[in-house]
Image (tube, grey):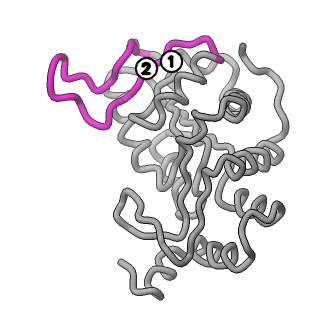
Amino acid sequence: MIPTSYPDAQTMAQMTARMLLDIGAVHFNTAELFTHASGRQAPTYIDCRKIISYPRVRSTLMDFMCCKTMRAAGLEAFDNIAGGETAGIPFAAFVAERLALPMSYVRKKPKGYGRTAQIEGEMREGDRVLLVEDLTTDGGSKLKFVDAIRAAGAECNHTAVVFFYGVMAGTEDRLAEHGLALHYLCTWADVIAEARRGGDFDEATLAEVERFLSDPEAWRTDRGLA
């Protein structure tokens, strides 16, 4: 079913943050830091992949994603929904089902055998593609996926995610310069605000996380971290 009604963006952000907290997708630890895929350490970690294991949460969030994206881009803006390997694949499938559109997925690099394909599924030349992933940090992976989609002869001017870090300066501008609009449901600011309202973490932890998010590089430098 294609969702056609939804709350305003602020309410969606608050509700998304609450659901992420409720399913244990949000992790803050200022004593034992998390190592991210980049190899850098931080007191924050979010695991949006957990969403797929909670049917009511994932259904609500995918409805939100469809509605917010259609409101911004238009009801008939897309011909194909593409997921980024690997976290974006299930979310793309959920969105494609709701919008009654074909689904494909984009590999991080072409597979080294068979057709050496980078895009799996059927994506036709000229298709208007919505790229779906779980989250965005600095937008780097989005640009690689979009370049692969465009190289295949399709258009990709929009990407949708559940979570946007919202702390790295210039991310949305960088995507916009690449002709890509970013649609997201909530940011770290929304999560911290909801965690404070709900008492999910103690105030000292939230305050330290806010200091980190306000200037990650300075925070790491103060602690002698690379």
| Pointer 2 residue | 104
Q: Residues within 10 Å of mark 2 (few under 14, many from 20)?
A: many
Quadrant where the image shows the C terminus: bottom left
- 131 over 197 or under it: above or below: above
Quadrant where the image shows the N terminus: top right
Q: Residues within 10 Å of mark 1 (few under 14, many from 20)?
A: many
Magenta span of residues = 98-126
| Pointer 1 residue | 80
Q: Is residue 145 magenta?
A: no
Tag 2, which secondary structure? strand
Q: Is residue 34 left or right of residue 149?
A: right
Q: Position of residue 201 (x, y in %)?
A: 71, 68
- Are dots 2 and 1 in contact, CB under 8 Å? yes
Q: Main secondary structure of the magenta part?
A: loop
Task: Please name the residue shown 33% across and 31% down the image.
Answer: 107
Q: Is residue 108 magenta?
A: yes
Task: Please name the residue shown 21% across and 28% down the image.
Answer: 111
Residue closer to the observer: 127 or 101: 101
Using the numbered discs, state the Cα–Cα distance from disc 2 to disc 1 in whole angstroms.
7 Å
Which mark is nearer the camera, 2 or 1?
2
Tag 1, which secondary structure? strand
Q: Position of residue 76 (x, y in %)?
A: 65, 16
Q: Position of residue 125 (x, y in %)?
A: 38, 14
Give the mark count.
Answer: 2
> Can you tell which quarter of the image residue 144 is in?
top left
Q: Earlier in the sequence, mark 2 or mark 1?
A: 1
Tag 1: amino acid:
Asn
Q: Is residue 216 left or right of residue 123?
A: right
Q: Is residue 52 left or right of residue 217?
A: right
- 151 over 161 or under it: above or below: above
